[in-house]
Amino acid sequence: MIAVHRAFTYVFVILVFACGGTSSTPPTPSATAIAAPSSPTPTRPPRAIFPSVTTSAGVIWEPTDEPPGPPVEGVRWWAKGTWPDGNTTIAAVYAPPGDGPFPAVVYLHEAAGLTQAQLDVARKISAGGFIVVAGCRFELARVPCKRRLNLYETSAAFVDFAKAFPNARRGTAALVGASAGSSEALYLTLTRNDISAIVADSGVGIDYPKVPVLVLASRADSLIANSVEQSQAFEAEMRARGGIVESHYYDIGGHIVLVNAQTTDDAIQRVIAFLSKYVTR
């Protein structure tokens, strides 16, 4: 027992001296760290101005600042729409260089909200010679806004704004819908007579408009079962009713071919060609 006690004592002494002993000498103070200067906050470009627009529904559209978050490439104007009841929404407006007038297009986003990828699609379509209004219908994704009880009311406000925008060609607007936005575009057209054409990307429905429709879908769509079959049935019914319909179905890609990396370039070129054919004439 004494041997064990002595062994423990020796180990304790060794550990103490290995750690610097029991000296009360204070450790040498470390050098005070010098805080690195903070990087400057990136400045946003100044707000682009356009004359305010008041639509027939009483929605007032005015220039506004870009929403907080990463900068969005290529937006020429940010606009805030205010209803008579005080509710507001926001839209990105893309336009080619120059004063126009340019044909108007409204992009209706998917159920996930107005994402950065869809803003990129709107920008690329605009490069084909169009003013594109990409508005927020409810608060999700890159651009926040307050959801209205009637989404069609919000979408209609975007159409009215696009038509009345100072750089837009007056009279009509085309609709490009993604997923749920496609079904909404088809329905909205039945309630108005100022829609010139529709692009339905990965979504159709039971509404058959009298304006030309471009249907896009992918057999690789993992979100909507039988997406291509549903689109083909819609296409056949459109033709049976005497409507004008074009289509392209991909074997690759996925849901929303305008956004999917495998199909986006080809799909955007098809959209620009379709809109140039039916909207600019």
Image (spheres, grey):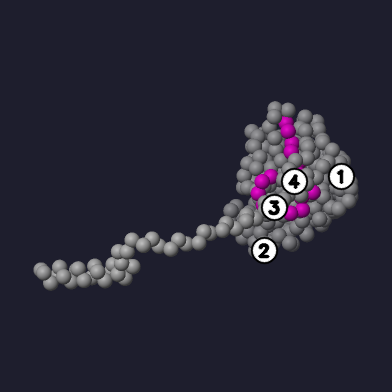
Disc 3 secondary structure class: loop
- Residue at horizontal 73 percent and vertical 33 percent from the top: 82
- Distance of label 4 from label 3 (alpha carbons): 20 Å
Disc 2 secondary structure class: loop
Q: How busy is the neighbourhood of tag 2: few (under 14 within 10 Å), some, or many (20 plus)?
A: some
* 221 sits left or right of 168 in the view: left
Q: Nearer the viewer, residue 78 or 160?
A: 78
For the residues bearing labels 4 and 3, Cβ distance under 8 angstroms:
no
Which mark is in front, 1 or 2?
1
Q: Which residue corresponds to mark 2?
A: 262
Q: Which residue corresponds to mark 1?
A: 167
Q: Which residue corresponds to mark 3?
A: 42
Q: How busy is the neighbourhood of tag 3: few (under 14 within 10 Å), some, or many (20 plus)?
A: few
The relative height of residue 264 versus residue 54 in the rendered view (above or below) is below
Write down the quadrant of residue 88 in the picture: top right
Earlier residue among tags 1 and 2: 1
- The magenta region covers 67-83
Disc 4 secondary structure class: strand
For the residues bearing labels 1 and 4, Cβ distance under 8 angstroms:
no
- Distance of label 2 from label 3 (alpha carbons): 33 Å
Q: Which residue corresponds to mark 4?
A: 92
Residue type at the position of mark 1? Asn
The relative height of residue 166 versus residue 24 in the rendered view (above or below) is above
- Residue at horizontal 78 percent and vertical 59 percent from the top: 269
Q: Position of residue 53 (x, y in %)?
A: 82, 35
Regarding residue 215, the answer to whether it shows in the image is no
